[in-house]
Amino acid sequence: MIKTLNDIQARKVIQSARVARLGCIANGGPYITPINYYFEDSCVYSHSLAGLKIAALRANPRACVQVDQVETDLRWRSVLAFGNFEEIVKPSERKEILSKLFKRFPMLTPVESSLAGDGCSPEVIVFRIRIDRITGVSEG
Amino acid sequence: MIKTLNDIQARKVIQSARVARLGCIANGGPYITPINYYFEDSCVYSHSLAGLKIAALRANPRACVQVDQVETDLRWRSVLAFGNFEEIVKPSERKEILSKLFKRFPMLTPVESSLAGDGCSPEVIVFRIRIDRITGVSEG
């Protein structure tokens, strides 16, 4: 039987996972990329190099973030959070977010790690999805 | 270093995984759900009960299917395939697709398994995403 997760259960799934799938609309169609992230104060924080995803989110900030925990075909949880893309441009804020990301994901690429000390490096886009709705379901 | 997968490598990722994330546009925004599926003749085959995802895909058939193999933060492959939603309504075709799905996923819920013998049961939506473009990247 598939059950609905309550808000606390759904947030726990987002808080504990390491990989999420970020959905946006690119060239009029759906577009999904996996992201590393952390979740804090109802926001999903992540970073990216410039590319189609960022161009799409700048043009249309509506996004969703899907996170699942699949143990077996019959035992899983899936959460879908909806919100808006916000680019972080303030250097001190970029630096703080990047430092939290690299703390959680110390194995990120050397290029990115070397940039972490300097939140101003414009090559790295720092952003959050400000979540306004969370839904979740589970089985098993 | 992030590398681009060629078409053969990208198809191999889709063929071998058991869970994909299906993206569509629902209520004007991106929407993602995990699906069990199989991949055959450039189509992703799956099934679903009626709901928001199916209503959205009937209204706007453009879809994407994202599949990844994440071993570590530094060793992963991710494939994104784009295509159009097509509902399968012909009873013999529904039956054949459901039987392939249940063969690959024998642990699906008893309700669904009991329906498998009768491809006509309208509660189960059988569909394919006919893929017209595949992109893939890898690291490590």
Image (tube, coloured by chain):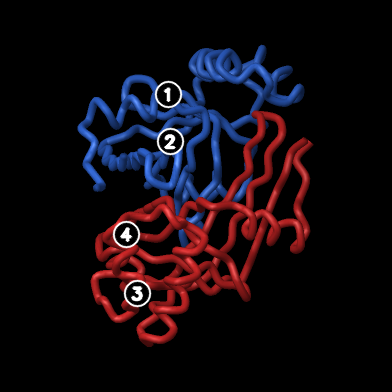
Chain colours: A red, B blue
Separation of marks 4 and 1 at Cα, in angstroms:
27 Å
Separation of marks 4 and 2 at Cα, in angstroms:
23 Å
Q: Is residue B27 visible?
A: no
Badge 3 and badge 2 both on one subunit: no
Please name which of the two marks, 3 or 2, marks the residue nearer to the observer: 3
Q: As rendered, which of B71 and A138 lies closer to the eye?
A: B71
The quarter holding residue B137 reads top left
Task: Give the residue number, with chain letter if any, for mark 3.
Answer: A117
Please name which of the two marks, 4 or 3, marks the residue nearer to the observer: 3
Separation of marks 3 and 1 at Cα, in angstroms:
39 Å
Cβ atoms at labels 1 and 2 below 8 Å apart: yes
Please name which of the two marks, 3 or 1, marks the residue nearer to the observer: 3
First reached walking from the N terminus: tag 4 or tag 3: 4
Task: Give the residue number, with chain letter if any, for mark 4.
Answer: A26
The quarter holding residue A59 reads bottom left
Q: Secondary structure at mark 1?
A: helix
First reached walking from the N terminus: tag 1 or tag 2: 1
Q: Amino acid at mark 2?
A: Gln
Task: Give the residue number, with chain letter if any, for mark 2.
Answer: B69
Separation of marks 3 and 2 at Cα, in angstroms:
30 Å
